[in-house]
Structures are given as structure tokens and as C-alpha cells.
Image: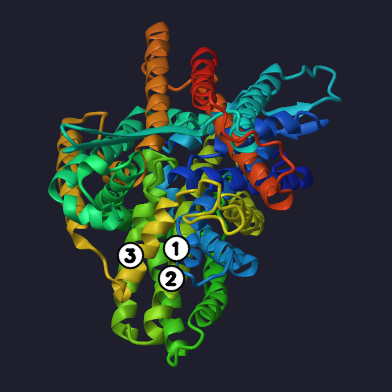
């Protein structure tokens, strides 16, 4: 049975307005910056729909008139920025890491983001009715955002004699701002001033040096927020991956491959003469090998995602085509069922093929057969882009945008396209250099399309519940894509100079680089397939781990269990430093505990509620935006911020800061 919209189809209220357009574009740029930072730090991104909705409600209430559908348009555009950031940061930094780009090219990156994002919107328009109206997919963020927006009422008119101020909209915005201020303050005291440590790490050797232990914790409020939002299941699996890769993998690898690790770490002499730095170098070399287990697990997980979604994808396309035939037969659609017309969508896709061709031509500059290879790459983008965008849209309905395995889709893209190009171009001479570059251009567009596709479906679900007009939301999604595509390259350039992205910063070598795990993986896969070589031993172990997780997941699925074993969550945990997974795990535990308490009080099950999501989103947004600001200061005004350097109590103060955020989230959430 279809959901009854809050605003009936026959009722017409303001949706597209100038203030909604401007606010949506601005929030898209700001939230794309925040998600770019957090995604490069930890390899996970979170949906920005709820903070965008709360911010929109808080700002639009300052105007004399506003509506719930205006607010919905703002969050639609704003959340597009967060999603496009994921598509770009998972892929395009690889081009800088592999030396293809000297820096982050604004024009090229903006064009890749716009093309991928617009096609992501276009590819999912035919699927809206099939996935949102005719199926029972959850679309959790879409439903949660609709509930947030409903608290603001349908219309606000301050000139109406019965107008009453909406205290809930004001309170939600204030909650978000306070949490963002706390997250930003701690980031400033850590990266900007140096009073707080950003992490605590230790390396120990036991049993006469035969057992090597290394461990750390990243003291980040934003990661608490990430864990709170993604929930206990994903948080546990990310932490499990960290345990496998670090706590278990590092010492076992040292036991088995000690001589090889000594050579890799440059450690010589007998064990009794080794310094603490030597042991740290050995632990680091062991971990670098063990993290390749995560690479193997990601590769299998990406392929498995496609296999499991083949049937639902075909059924969704069939249902969409059936709905289109009904429309052509003369059945007039209600306002709440009016998508962007299919002829316009088809024209948009066809017109996109022209810049697609020329951007691949640019990527392959210098290759003799680039004219026909660029044509093949354009065709691959349209075919694989539609398939993977459809997969992402369906997965968003199943598990939500924050848990959507976009990186798995991108891994599959890199492997398939690299193998095709390798057969067409070979890897001799310039082909071996340009092939991986062309693959990353394609991956950037497909990853952007898939990320936007999932977000578009979440927003359309929210609009479906509220009574929005679908084609208007689709237009605003494109506006959000364009705004974010212009901002993200500038943000990445600043972050690369301030911290370094997957490498040491060229202008600030003392800073701790952002890990950019997915982009590093994409670089290794594309260059490895084209002949740089892939070390397969640990990757094969990852294959085995992935198969085991898939079996466990299917067993849990057959039992109807809530706790599942998605491969990619564990794989990301293996690939990342253990310290990043610990605050994520703590955030997931806290969210689960609060849900259980709430369920005990209300007797209505473990439903999300309270201010927890707003607080978690605020911690993420505040830390991320302050991280960008600190990077700007490090680049534009080096030495002007009073950085304290080595403060003896910094680790303890950092732990205290994280504990403060945990307690704040526990009490106020």
C-alpha cells in the first residue's frame, strides 16, 4: 500500500524558491567540504540529509514565509554535496598519488563531478516508481529526514493572525550548532594549537621479541559521530576488521615473515640491540602487508554486491518501463508522481556523451589510438554507470546511504575497465602510463554517479512521504551536484597542502596525512593491473576472508537475524589503522545502548529518536569544517597560529576531550 503524503497531491504550496535555491547550493558546498574531510580521514561517509534538514528549518524560519516542501528542496540539494564528495574522494586523489596530476585540477575535477552526478540523477529517474512506490524498501535516511522535517509544520506564515513560533525547529538548529561548536573546538585545540593529541599509539614486543604488538586510538569526536550514525552492526564489523589486520595480523606476520619484514623496515643486527624506533618500523612494515588482506576482501565484496543485486535490478527496470508505458497511454500522473519526462532524461544522457568523449580524449592525450579508445570509454561510462547507479539506488533502499557499498561498486569498475583497456591498449610504453589514468577518470565518474544515485533515491523517498513534486527534487539534486562540484576541488587542494592526502603534504611535511584508503586502493589496483605488479599473497587471504564473511552473512540472512556480515565493512576496517575503528566502535555501542533504553521506556522497539543523530552530525560537521579551516591557515598563514608543539599532557587531554564528547552525546542524545 502506497504511503499517504503529508501534503496531498491536489494541494500546491511553495517548493522551488530563490531562497531555497541559494541556501541549498550553499549548504551543498559546505557539507561537501565536511564529508570530504571525514571520508579522506576514515574511508567512511555519512548521510547529510538530517543535519541539512535541521539547518534548513533553522534558517528558513527567519523568513516571513516558508514551507516544508521548501525545506525538503534545500536538504535535497545539500545532501547531494555530501554524496558527490564521496564519489570524488574515493577515486580522484589516486591521480595525484600516481603522479598523473601535479595537484587538484579544478576544471577537470569539476567536470568529472558534474558529469557523474548529473548522470547519477538521470539514471535513477526511471527507477523511482519501481523502488519507492511499488516496493517496500526501507530507505532509512529518507524516512528519518521526513520525520525531522515534519516537526517544523507544513507552512509558516508570520503575517497570519494565528501564527505561533515553531520552537522545535529553533531547538533542533541550536542542538546542531552546539554540537558542531564542540567538535570544532576540539579539532582547533588538536590540529591548530597542539594542546590536545590527535591520537595515542604504542608498540610493544613480548615473549622475547617473538610477539609484536602495535595499537593506537584516534581521538576524534567526528569518528564517534560516524559510529553513532552507522550503528552498532557496521561499527562492530569495522572494529573487527581492525582487530584482524592489526591485533591478529601484525604479530602473526612477524612470526612467519620476520626476515622479510626486517629487510623491508631496514632493521639489522641482533634483537637485543634494536631501538624502540626499530620495533615501530617493523610493526609498520607488518601492518602495511596485512592491510592488503582488506584489499582482497574489498575486491570480492565489490563483485558479490553486483551478483546479489542482478535480479532486483532487472525487476526494477521492468517495473519502471511498465510505468512509463502507462503514462504514454494517457494516464495523467498526480503532481506527486510527476518525474522529469523520460524524453528529457534521454536527451540529457545523450548530450552528456559529448563532454564524456572529450574528457577521455584529454586523459589519453599522447596515445595514438585515443580517438576510438575514448569512444569505448564513453560507452563504458554510460553502460556501467547505469548498472552501478541502479545498484547503488537499490542498496540505498536496503541499508541506507551511509552504509551503501559505493567503494565496492568502484572497485568492480576499476577492475573491469582496467582489464578491458589492458586488452585494447596493452601496457607497453605510453599505454602503461595512460591506461591507469583513463581508468581513474572513468572510476571517478561512475563512483560519483553511484553516490548521487543512492542519495537521490533517499531524497525522493523523503519527498514521497511529504508530498513533494519529484521532478522539482530532481532539478534541485542537479543544482546541489553543480554547487558541490565547484567546491570540492578547492577543498581537496587545501587539505592536500595542509595535511597531505595519501602522501606527505608538499608544503606542511610535519602534518599527519589523511589516509584516503579507497583512493590508495584504486591507485594500486589500476597501476597493478597495467603492469606495476600486485603482491597477491595477502590479497588471496582477503579473498578467503571475504568468502567466509559472505557465508556467515547468508546464514544470518536465512535466520532472519538483524546482525549481518557485509564484507565491505570488515574490509575497510582491515585496510584502515586500528585507531580509527575504536571511536567508531564506541559511537556504535552508545547508539545501541540509547536505542535499547528508549525502547524500554516506550515499548515500541529499538527505533532511532531523540537528538542523537543531530548531535552526532554536529560533531562530524564541526570537526570536519574546523579541519578545513586549520588547513587553510596552515597554507596561507604558516606560523601565525600559536602552535604549542610537544605538550606533555596532550595525550591525556586528548583522551579527556574524546571522553567529554562521549558523555555529551550519551547525556543529550
Query: Which quarter of the figure has residue 42?
Result: top left
**For mark 3, does the 10 Å Cα neighbourhood hold few (<14), some (14 to 19), or many (20 or more) residues?**
many
The mark nearer the N terminus, 1 or 3, is: 1
- From the top left corner, tell me how far across and down residue 96 is, in percent: 51, 65
Which picture quadrant has residue 376?
Answer: bottom left
List the residue tagged with mark 3: 525
Disc ID at residue 381: 2
- Taking the view exactly as shown, the residue that stands out farthest to the bottom is 368
- Quarter of the image for the N terminus: give it: top left
Proximity of marks 2 and 1: CB atoms separated by less than 8 Å: yes
| Residue closer to the observer: 2 or 537 | 537
Display colour scheme: rainbow
Asked whether disc 3 touches disc 2, contact meaning CB atoms under 8 Å apart, the reply is no
**Marks 1 and 3 close (CB-CB < 8 Å):** no
Q: Is residue 147 left or right of residue 323?
A: right
Q: CA distance from mark 2 to mark 1?
A: 7 Å
Amino acid at each position: 500500500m502506497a504511503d499517504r503524503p503529508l501534503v496531498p497531491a491536489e494541494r500546491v504550496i511553495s517548493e522551488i524558491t530563490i531562497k531555497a535555491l541559494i541556501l541549498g547550493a550553499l549548504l551543498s558546498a559546505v557539507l561537501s567540504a565536511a564529508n570530504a574531510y571525514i571520508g579522506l580521514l576514515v574511508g567512511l561517509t555519512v548521510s547529510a540529509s538530517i543535519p541539512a534538514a535541521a539547518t534548513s528549518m533553522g534558517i528558513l524560519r527567519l523568513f516571513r514565509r516558508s514551507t516544508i516542501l521548501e525545506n525538503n528542496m534545500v536538504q535535497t540539494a545539500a545532501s547531494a554535496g555530501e554524496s558527490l564528495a564521496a564519489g570524488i574522494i574515493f577515486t580522484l586523489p589516486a591521480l595525484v598519488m600516481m603522479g598523473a596530476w601535479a595537484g587538484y585540477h579544478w576544471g577537470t575535477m569539476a567536470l568529472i563531478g558534474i558529469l557523474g552526478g548529473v548522470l547519477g540523477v538521470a539514471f535513477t529517474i526511471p527507477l523511482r516508481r519501481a523502488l519507492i512506490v511499488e516496493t517496500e524498501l526501507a530507505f532509512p535516511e529518507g524516512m528519518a529526514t521526513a520525520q525531522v522535517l515534519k516537526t517544523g509544520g507544513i507552512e509558516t506564515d508570520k503575517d497570519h493572525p494565528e501564527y505561533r513560533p515553531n520552537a522545535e525547529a529553533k531547538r533542533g538548529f541550536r542542538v546542531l550548532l552546539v554540537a558542531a561548536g564542540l567538535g570544532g573546538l576540539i579539532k582547533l585545540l588538536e590540529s591548530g594549537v597542539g594542546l590536545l593529541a590527535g591520537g595515542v599509539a604504542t608498540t610493544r614486543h613480548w615473549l622475547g621479541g617473538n610477539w609484536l604488538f602495535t595499537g593506537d586510538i584516534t581521538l576524534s569526536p567526528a569518528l564517534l559521530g560516524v559510529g553513532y550514525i552507522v550503528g552498532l552492526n557496521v561499527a562492530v564489523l569495522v572494529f573487527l576488521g581492525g582487530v584482524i589486520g592489526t591485533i591478529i595480523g601484525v604479530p602473526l606476520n612477524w612470526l612467519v615473515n620476520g626476515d622479510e619484514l626486517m629487510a623491508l623496515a631496514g632493521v639489522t643486527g641482533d634483537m637485543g640491540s634494536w631501538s624502540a624506533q626499530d620495533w615501530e618500523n617493523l610493526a609498520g612494515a607488518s601492518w602495511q602487508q596485512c592491510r592488503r588482506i582488506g584489499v582482497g576482501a574489498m575486491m570480492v565484496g565489490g563483485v558479490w554486491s553486483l551478483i546479489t543485486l542482478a535480479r532486483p535490478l532487472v525487476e526494477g527496470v521492468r517495473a519502471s518501463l511498465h510505468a512509463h508505458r502507462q503514462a504514454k497511454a494517457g494516464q495523467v500522473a498526480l503532481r506527486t508522481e510527476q518525474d522529469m519526462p523520460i524524453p528529457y532524461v534521454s536527451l540529457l544522457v545523450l548530450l552528456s556523451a559529448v563532454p564524456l568523449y572529450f574528457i577521455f580524449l584529454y586523459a589519453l592525450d599522447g596515445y595514438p589510438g585515443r580517438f576510438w579508445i575514448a569512444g569505448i570509454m564513453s560507452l563504458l561510462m554510460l553502460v556501467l554507470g547505469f548498472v552501478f547507479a541502479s545498484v547503488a539506488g537499490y542498496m540505498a533502499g536496503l541499508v541506507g546511504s551511509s552504509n551503501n557499498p559505493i567503494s565496492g561498486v568502484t572497485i568492480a569498475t576499476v577492475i573491469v575497465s582496467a582489464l578491458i583497456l589492458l586488452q585494447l591498449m596493452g601496457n607497453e610504453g605510453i599505454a602503461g602510463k595512460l591506461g591507469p589514468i583513463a581508468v581513474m577518470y572513468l572510476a571517478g565518474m561512475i563512483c560519483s554517479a553511484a553516490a548521487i544515485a543512492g542519495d537521490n533515491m533517499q531524497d525522493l523517498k523523503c519527498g514521497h512521504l511529504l508530498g513533494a513534486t519529484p521532478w522539482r527534487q530532481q532539478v534541485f539534486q542537479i543544482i546541489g551536484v553543480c554547487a558541490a562540484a565547484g567546491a570540492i576541488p578547492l577543498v581537496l587542494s587545501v587539505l592536500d597542502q595542509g595535511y597531505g592526502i595519501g602522501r606527505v603534504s608538499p608544503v606542511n611535511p610535519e602534518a599527519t596525512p589523511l589516509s584516503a584508503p579507497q583512493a590508495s586502493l584504486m591507485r594500486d589496483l589500476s597501476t597493478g593491473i597495467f603492469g606495476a605488479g600486485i603482491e597477491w599473497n595477502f590479497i588471496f587471504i582477503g579473498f578467503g576472508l571475504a568468502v567466509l564473511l559472505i557465508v556467515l552473512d547468508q546464514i544470518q540472512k536465512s535466520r532472519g537475524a538483524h546482525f549481518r556480515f557485509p564484507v565491505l565493512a570488515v574490509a575497510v576496517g582491515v585496510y584502515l589503522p586500528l585507531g580509527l575503528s575504536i571511536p567508531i566502535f564506541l559511537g556504535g555501542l552508545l547508539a545501541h545502548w540509547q536505542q535499547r533504553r528508549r525502547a524500554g521506556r516506550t515499548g515500541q522497539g529499538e527505533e532511532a529518536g531523540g537528538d542523537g543523530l543531530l548531535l552526532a552530525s554536529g560533531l562530524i560537521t564541526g570537526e570536519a569544517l574546523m579541519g578545513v579551516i586549520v588547513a587553510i591557515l596552515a597554507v596561507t598563514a604558516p606560523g601565525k597560529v600559536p602552535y604549542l608543539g610537544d605538550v606533555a599532557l596532550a595525550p591525556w587531554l586528548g583522551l579527556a576531550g574524546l571522553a567529554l564528547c562521549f558523555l555529551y552525546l550519551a547525556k543529550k542524545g
